[in-house]
Amino acid sequence: MRKKRIVIALGHEALGTTLPDQKVAAKKTAKAVADLIEADCQVVISHSNGPQVGMIHTAMSEFCRLHPEYTATPMSVCSAMSQGYIGYDLQNEIRTELLNRGIYKTVSTVLTQVCVDPYDDAFYHPTKVIGRVMSEDEAEAEEKKGNHVIKYGSGYRRIVAAPKPMDIVEMDAIRALSDADQVVIACGGGGIPVLMQANKLKGASAVIEKDLAAGRLAKLLDADMFVILTGEDKVCLHYNTAQETPLDVMTVEEARAYIADGEFEEGTILPKIQAAVDFIGDSAVKKVLITRLDKSKEAMAGATGTIIKKG
């Protein structure tokens, strides 16, 4: 009998912000992941990278400013760097936690490229803020390079597009590792955004919403369950108001209606619900669980969290 295959999307709470934060957070995350592996699940992990890729982009931009002889670092390369160093911490902490429990499994990070559509509307309406605060002169220089900037407090910051994920280049490798019952970390930060140009992949100046990429990963992997770990116990209607209502269960039809009504905030819970709906599709058996990282074990047992299913 095939093991239950689960794709886990880790949020910011699972990784922290600074390097020391990340080391501490990765240890806690490893315990939650190990609980699922110990329950005899095949696990594939995706994760956010917002603070990390921002730090890398800022550092590389500053280096280029101080040393003009070096070229600027593209967003796709910054994304690749973030996948590498986040994966490094996660895979080592998960491996250690598993060995402490008497479980030996190889844990691997796959540097993952995700194809996007060059005609995606997002490229015409960039929204994702990245990098450091710039002066007006620096902002003008960025615009001369063809980049987009917005006013940010007393300065300016660069913004990039957030196109939808279309395909995952390394999908066969991820599937082979998962089929071999190994633990895989993939599509970190939404994946490295690339454009397909004949036989060549070209890095795109963009970031991909990590929940949408994780949902796409779960769908292509034919996962049984998609688990989104966030900062709240459950999905709530009327969040942060006196009428806040936690949800134990939500159907796909209800989720679509809530999205149409503008119930979920863009950039936070909305992409998670969209990813859940896309993953389930018309399946009567696939489910999505949304809950807090430190409540994942209880949520898998049905004690907390929000379950999304077809009906």
Image (cartoon, helix red, strand yellow):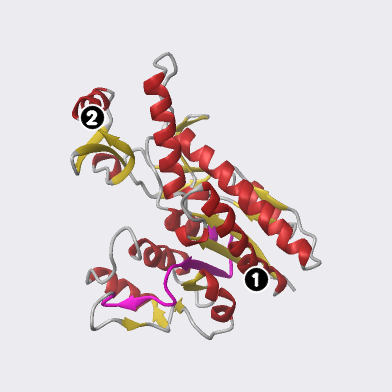
Location of mark 2 (residue): 139
Say which residue appears at 19% left-offset and 44% top-offset.
Answer: 153
Q: Quadrant of residue 69?
A: top left
The residue lying toward the viewer, choosing from 94 and 307, is: 94
Horizontal placement of 252 versus 32: left or right? left
Say which residue appears at 41% left-offset and 47% top-offset.
Answer: 208
Q: Is residue 194 visible?
A: no
Q: Residues within 10 Å of mark 1 (few under 14, many from 20)?
A: some
**SS of the residue at dot 2?**
helix
Residue 226 coordinates in the image, percent (x, y): 52, 67
**SS of the residue at dot 1?**
helix
Extent of the magenta region: 217-239
Horizontal placement of 63 versus 285: left or right? left
Location of mark 1 (residue): 36
Q: Quadrant of residue 38?
A: bottom right
Type of amino acid at the residue the image marks with label 2:
Ala
Say which residue appears at 28% left-offset and 81% top-offset.
Answer: 244
Inter-mark Cα distance, 2 to 1? 47 Å
Residue 236 lies in the magenta stretch: yes
The residue lying toward the viewer, choosing from 179 and 7, is: 7
